[in-house]
Image: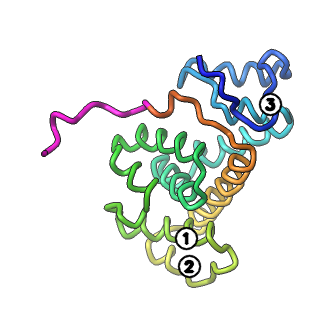
Amino acid sequence: MNDTPISRLPVPALESLPDDLQARLARYLEKPGFIPNVLRAFGLRPAQLRAFMDLYDELMLGDSELSKTEREMIAVTVSAANHCYYCLTSHGAALRVRSGDPVLADQLAANYRVAALTPRQRAMLDLAHKLTLDATACGEEDITRLREHGFSDAAIWDIVAIAAFYNFTNRLSNALDLRPNREYHFMARADRAADEPR
Protein backbone atom coordinates (compact mmCIF):
# COMPACT_ATOMS: atom_id res chain seq x y z
CA MET A 1 0.00 0.00 0.00
CA ASN A 2 1.39 3.38 -1.00
CA ASP A 3 0.56 6.11 1.53
CA THR A 4 2.15 8.93 -0.48
CA PRO A 5 -0.34 11.80 -0.78
CA ILE A 6 -1.75 12.20 -4.28
CA SER A 7 -2.34 15.95 -3.95
CA ARG A 8 -1.19 18.90 -1.88
CA LEU A 9 -4.88 19.37 -0.99
CA PRO A 10 -7.23 16.95 0.79
CA VAL A 11 -8.75 14.21 -1.37
CA PRO A 12 -12.35 13.37 -0.45
CA ALA A 13 -13.38 9.78 0.12
CA LEU A 14 -15.38 8.32 -2.76
CA GLU A 15 -18.38 7.70 -0.49
CA SER A 16 -18.53 11.41 0.41
CA LEU A 17 -19.26 12.41 -3.19
CA PRO A 18 -22.75 12.85 -4.67
CA ASP A 19 -24.34 9.57 -5.78
CA ASP A 20 -24.06 10.30 -9.50
CA LEU A 21 -20.33 10.90 -9.21
CA GLN A 22 -19.82 7.79 -7.08
CA ALA A 23 -21.54 5.74 -9.79
CA ARG A 24 -19.58 7.37 -12.58
CA LEU A 25 -16.24 6.89 -10.86
CA ALA A 26 -17.04 3.30 -9.91
CA ARG A 27 -17.16 2.42 -13.61
CA TYR A 28 -13.40 2.97 -13.73
CA LEU A 29 -13.01 -0.02 -11.42
CA GLU A 30 -14.17 -2.24 -14.29
CA LYS A 31 -11.76 -0.71 -16.82
CA PRO A 32 -8.94 0.19 -16.29
CA GLY A 33 -9.41 -1.33 -12.83
CA PHE A 34 -8.67 1.77 -10.72
CA ILE A 35 -9.97 5.31 -10.30
CA PRO A 36 -7.52 7.84 -11.78
CA ASN A 37 -6.05 9.99 -9.05
CA VAL A 38 -6.81 13.19 -10.96
CA LEU A 39 -10.51 12.38 -10.70
CA ARG A 40 -10.20 11.57 -7.01
CA ALA A 41 -8.47 14.92 -6.47
CA PHE A 42 -11.17 16.75 -8.43
CA GLY A 43 -13.68 15.38 -5.92
CA LEU A 44 -12.86 18.41 -3.78
CA ARG A 45 -15.01 20.36 -6.26
CA PRO A 46 -17.80 18.02 -7.40
CA ALA A 47 -19.38 20.36 -9.96
CA GLN A 48 -15.97 20.88 -11.58
CA LEU A 49 -15.37 17.11 -11.54
CA ARG A 50 -18.56 16.61 -13.57
CA ALA A 51 -17.56 19.33 -16.03
CA PHE A 52 -14.00 17.96 -16.29
CA MET A 53 -15.20 14.42 -17.04
CA ASP A 54 -17.75 15.68 -19.57
CA LEU A 55 -15.15 17.76 -21.42
CA TYR A 56 -12.58 14.94 -21.31
CA ASP A 57 -15.12 12.48 -22.70
CA GLU A 58 -16.04 14.84 -25.53
CA LEU A 59 -12.49 15.79 -26.47
CA MET A 60 -10.81 12.42 -26.10
CA LEU A 61 -13.61 9.93 -26.82
CA GLY A 62 -16.20 11.89 -28.81
CA ASP A 63 -16.63 12.19 -32.57
CA SER A 64 -13.59 13.68 -34.28
CA GLU A 65 -11.56 13.31 -37.45
CA LEU A 66 -8.60 12.81 -35.12
CA SER A 67 -8.04 9.21 -34.08
CA LYS A 68 -7.94 8.44 -30.38
CA THR A 69 -4.24 7.68 -30.82
CA GLU A 70 -3.64 11.13 -32.35
CA ARG A 71 -5.48 12.74 -29.45
CA GLU A 72 -3.24 10.94 -26.96
CA MET A 73 -0.23 12.04 -29.01
CA ILE A 74 -1.28 15.65 -28.44
CA ALA A 75 -1.78 15.01 -24.72
CA VAL A 76 1.72 13.53 -24.35
CA THR A 77 3.43 16.21 -26.45
CA VAL A 78 1.81 19.04 -24.47
CA SER A 79 2.52 17.32 -21.15
CA ALA A 80 6.19 16.84 -22.11
CA ALA A 81 6.53 20.55 -22.88
CA ASN A 82 4.99 21.35 -19.49
CA HIS A 83 7.02 18.71 -17.59
CA CYS A 84 3.81 17.32 -16.13
CA TYR A 85 4.66 14.08 -14.34
CA TYR A 86 1.03 13.08 -13.80
CA CYS A 87 -0.11 13.55 -17.39
CA LEU A 88 3.06 12.16 -18.95
CA THR A 89 2.60 9.01 -16.91
CA SER A 90 -1.14 8.59 -17.44
CA HIS A 91 -1.29 9.61 -21.10
CA GLY A 92 1.97 7.89 -21.92
CA ALA A 93 0.20 4.72 -20.71
CA ALA A 94 -2.91 5.56 -22.73
CA LEU A 95 -0.81 6.16 -25.84
CA ARG A 96 0.95 2.81 -25.40
CA VAL A 97 -2.47 1.14 -25.17
CA ARG A 98 -3.99 3.03 -28.11
CA SER A 99 -1.01 2.80 -30.47
CA GLY A 100 0.45 -0.54 -29.40
CA ASP A 101 3.81 1.21 -29.72
CA PRO A 102 5.68 1.85 -26.44
CA VAL A 103 8.59 3.36 -28.36
CA LEU A 104 6.38 6.08 -29.83
CA ALA A 105 5.03 6.92 -26.38
CA ASP A 106 8.53 7.19 -24.94
CA GLN A 107 9.75 9.30 -27.86
CA LEU A 108 6.90 11.78 -27.55
CA ALA A 109 7.44 11.98 -23.80
CA ALA A 110 11.09 12.89 -24.37
CA ASN A 111 10.93 14.97 -27.57
CA TYR A 112 8.23 14.58 -30.20
CA ARG A 113 10.64 15.72 -32.92
CA VAL A 114 12.62 12.46 -32.73
CA ALA A 115 9.58 10.27 -33.42
CA ALA A 116 8.91 8.76 -36.85
CA LEU A 117 5.77 10.77 -37.56
CA THR A 118 3.86 11.36 -40.75
CA PRO A 119 4.05 14.96 -42.05
CA ARG A 120 0.39 15.32 -41.03
CA GLN A 121 1.08 14.20 -37.47
CA ARG A 122 4.16 16.43 -37.24
CA ALA A 123 2.13 19.47 -38.31
CA MET A 124 -0.51 18.61 -35.69
CA LEU A 125 2.07 18.26 -32.90
CA ASP A 126 3.99 21.35 -34.04
CA LEU A 127 0.90 23.45 -33.43
CA ALA A 128 0.12 21.78 -30.09
CA HIS A 129 3.70 22.36 -28.95
CA LYS A 130 3.75 25.97 -30.18
CA LEU A 131 0.45 26.72 -28.46
CA THR A 132 1.90 25.30 -25.24
CA LEU A 133 5.10 27.34 -25.30
CA ASP A 134 3.61 30.62 -26.53
CA ALA A 135 -0.02 30.74 -27.60
CA THR A 136 0.39 34.33 -28.77
CA ALA A 137 2.90 33.13 -31.40
CA CYS A 138 0.22 31.06 -33.15
CA GLY A 139 -0.89 32.71 -36.37
CA GLU A 140 -2.75 32.27 -39.61
CA GLU A 141 0.22 30.42 -41.10
CA ASP A 142 -0.23 27.64 -38.52
CA ILE A 143 -3.86 27.16 -39.53
CA THR A 144 -2.92 27.25 -43.21
CA ARG A 145 -0.27 24.58 -42.68
CA LEU A 146 -2.79 22.26 -41.03
CA ARG A 147 -5.25 22.79 -43.87
CA GLU A 148 -2.48 21.92 -46.35
CA HIS A 149 -2.11 18.60 -44.53
CA GLY A 150 -5.80 17.86 -44.97
CA PHE A 151 -7.19 18.89 -41.60
CA SER A 152 -10.69 20.32 -41.72
CA ASP A 153 -11.68 23.33 -39.65
CA ALA A 154 -13.40 21.02 -37.16
CA ALA A 155 -10.24 18.92 -36.82
CA ILE A 156 -8.12 22.05 -36.33
CA TRP A 157 -10.52 23.14 -33.59
CA ASP A 158 -10.06 19.73 -31.94
CA ILE A 159 -6.25 19.98 -32.08
CA VAL A 160 -6.34 23.40 -30.43
CA ALA A 161 -9.00 22.41 -27.89
CA ILE A 162 -7.15 19.24 -26.84
CA ALA A 163 -3.85 21.10 -26.52
CA ALA A 164 -5.55 23.81 -24.47
CA PHE A 165 -7.25 21.21 -22.26
CA TYR A 166 -3.95 19.56 -21.40
CA ASN A 167 -2.31 22.90 -20.73
CA PHE A 168 -5.07 23.37 -18.13
CA THR A 169 -4.71 19.91 -16.59
CA ASN A 170 -0.90 20.11 -16.64
CA ARG A 171 -0.93 23.36 -14.72
CA LEU A 172 -3.43 22.02 -12.21
CA SER A 173 -1.44 18.82 -11.77
CA ASN A 174 1.89 20.61 -11.42
CA ALA A 175 0.59 23.19 -8.93
CA LEU A 176 -1.07 20.54 -6.74
CA ASP A 177 1.71 17.94 -7.24
CA LEU A 178 -0.82 15.34 -8.34
CA ARG A 179 0.64 11.83 -8.29
CA PRO A 180 -0.34 9.29 -10.94
CA ASN A 181 -1.63 5.84 -10.06
CA ARG A 182 1.21 3.31 -9.98
CA GLU A 183 -0.77 1.11 -12.36
CA TYR A 184 -0.09 3.50 -15.24
CA HIS A 185 3.62 2.70 -15.16
CA PHE A 186 3.01 -0.94 -16.04
CA MET A 187 0.29 -0.61 -18.67
CA ALA A 188 1.05 -1.96 -22.17
CA ARG A 189 4.69 -2.71 -21.43
CA ALA A 190 5.09 -6.21 -22.84
CA ASP A 191 8.46 -7.79 -22.24
CA ARG A 192 10.00 -7.80 -25.71
CA ALA A 193 13.63 -7.75 -24.64
CA ALA A 194 14.27 -11.17 -26.17
CA ASP A 195 13.05 -9.91 -29.56
CA GLU A 196 15.18 -6.78 -29.64
CA PRO A 197 18.64 -6.61 -31.26
CA ARG A 198 21.54 -6.25 -28.82
Q: Which residue position holds label 3?
A: 43
Does the magenta-highlighted stretch encompass residue 70? no
Q: Amino acid at mark 1?
A: Leu
In the image: residue 79, left or right of residue 119: right
Q: How many marks?
A: 3
Question: Please, what secondary structure does the residue beneath circle 3 have?
Answer: loop
Q: Which residue position holds label 1?
A: 127
Q: Amino acid at mark 2?
A: Asp
Of pointers 1 and 2, the one earlier in the residue sequence:
1
- 119 versus 106 height, above or below: below
Looking at the rendering, the stretch of residues picked out in magenta corresponds to: 186-198
- What secondary structure is the magenta-colored segment mainly? loop
The residue sitting at 41% across, 41% down in the picture is 96
The residue sitting at 66% across, 22% down in the picture is 3
In the image: residue 196, left or right of residue 13: left
Q: Quadrant of the N terminus?
A: top right
Marks 1/2: CA–CA distance: 7 Å
Q: Which residue position holds label 2?
A: 142
In the image: residue 117, left or right of residue 168: left
